Image (spheres, grey):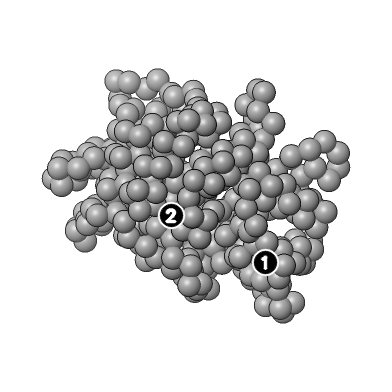
């Protein structure tokens, strides 16, 4: 497994990050343990979760993924695992049960620490912006957690370029901990949201980039074809899949991905991930796995080296996404 520093920090994370949204949802605790064991043995030291996972599922109160990770961490040396979690979504009833206010952040962090059964969170991320809370309040609360040692680094997720830039400015002038990472939605089939402005901001400010859905909710694995358009309804990104399976241009991208994969005697997923990891601004790609076979299929992507011509071909065929 290859490793890279998270932005300007000295924290080294694996180029593949294990996403755990499915833990306690489509993967029970025993299966989740097996997946994490296999990921760790493959050299993956980076786990990504969120307190709300998976509160949208009937009977799931949220925090279940964190609880499963916390139970698993007891079987490992804590210092060898990089744990990233997120705050923002609704976790309890009442006006302060969600958001990025100091009241919500401090309580949510304590709750996450308890579920994770750890003294600190390596990377604490704001899951998405909160227009009702001043940036100064959010960043001050996060800075308090860093200064107390309960959080080591902070990051943002789903921030537009202007808000990320303003956040960095607030941290600078207020002398507060700054966002060291960004978690954007980014793949061969979802490029413009990140590439239009965020790429330059992250490169210029040395922000680590940890994209989610790098395989476009499974479309880039090749599991969907022109003949088989049945969406996988167990995925949270079902709307994205429904859109892609009816888009001829998406299949044209897959034609090139499959051609390049065949030339390398590899898989479509490897090509899609290798394309993303080839870019200097990308730190680590978040992949989800519901089975050991899915995990094993993906971890080898870091060893696939695409040619300049192959990268240019993929860039050209996926223009407009």
Residue 272 shown left or right of residue 263 in the figure:
right
Q: Is 319 situated above or below 262?
A: below
Q: Is 180 situated above or below 69?
A: below
Residue 292 picture quarter: top left
Q: How crowded is mark 1: few (under 14 residues within 10 Å), some or many (20 or more)?
A: some
Asked if the residues shown at circle 2 and circle 1 are in contact, with their CB atoms under 8 angstroms apart, the answer is no
> Measuring 48% from the left and 72% from the top, which residue is drawn there?
10
Q: How crowded is mark 2: few (under 14 residues within 10 Å), some or many (20 or more)?
A: many
Towards the viewer: 185 or 127: 127
> Measuring 30% from the left and 25% from the top, which residue is drawn there?
226
Residue 134 picture quarter: bottom right
> Measuring 35% from the left and 53% from the top, which residue is drawn there?
43
Q: Name the residue under label 2.
A: 45
Can you give x and y, in whole percent of width and height, for residue 249 in the image? 34, 37
Which mark is on residue 149? Answer: 1
Can you give x and y, in whole percent of width and height, for residue 22 in the image? 51, 34
Residue 53 shown left or right of residue 251 in the figure:
right
> Measuring 51% from the left and 67% from the top, which residue is drawn there?
207
Can you give x and y, in whole percent of width and height, for residue 229 in the image? 37, 22
């Amino acid at each position: 497994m290859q490793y890279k520093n998270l932005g300007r920090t000295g924290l080294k994370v694996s180029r593949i990050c294990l996403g755990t949204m499915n833990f306690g949802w489509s993967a029970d605790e025993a299966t989740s343990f097996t997946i994490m064991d296999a990921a760790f043995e493959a050299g993956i030291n980076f786990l990504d979760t969120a307190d709300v996972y998976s509160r949208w599922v009937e009977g799931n109160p949220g925090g279940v993924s964190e609880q499963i990770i916390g139970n698993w961490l007891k079987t490992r040396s804590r210092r060898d695992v990089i744990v990233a979690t997120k705050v923002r979504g609704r976790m309890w009833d009442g006006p302060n049960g969600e958001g990025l206010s100091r009241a919500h952040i401090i309580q949510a962090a304590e709750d996450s620490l308890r579920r994770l059964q750890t003294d600190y969170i390596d990377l604490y991320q704001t899951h998405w912006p909160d227009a009702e809370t001043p940036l100064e309040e959010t960043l001050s609360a996060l800075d308090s957690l860093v200064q107390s040692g309960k959080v080591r680094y902070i990051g943002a997720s789903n921030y537009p370029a202007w808000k990320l830039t303003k956040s960095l400015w607030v941290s600078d002038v207020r002398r507060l901990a700054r966002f060291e990472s960004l978690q954007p939605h980014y793949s061969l089939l979802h490029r413009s949201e990140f590439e239009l402005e965020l790429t330059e901001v992250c490169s210029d400010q040395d922000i680590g980039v940890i994209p989610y859905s790098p395989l476009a909710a499974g479309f880039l694995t090749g599991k969907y074809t022109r003949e088989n358009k049945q969406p996988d309804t167990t995925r949270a990104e079902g709307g994205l899949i429904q859109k892609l399976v009816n888009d001829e241009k998406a299949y044209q991208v897959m034609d090139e991905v499959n051609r390049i994969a065949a030339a390398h005697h590899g898989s479509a997923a490897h090509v899609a991930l290798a394309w993303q990891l080839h870019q200097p601004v990308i730190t680590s790609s978040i992949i989800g796995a519901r089975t050991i076979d899915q995990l094993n299929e993906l971890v080898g992507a870091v060893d696939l080296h695409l040619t300049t011509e192959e990268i240019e071909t993929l860039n050209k065929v996926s223009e407009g996404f």
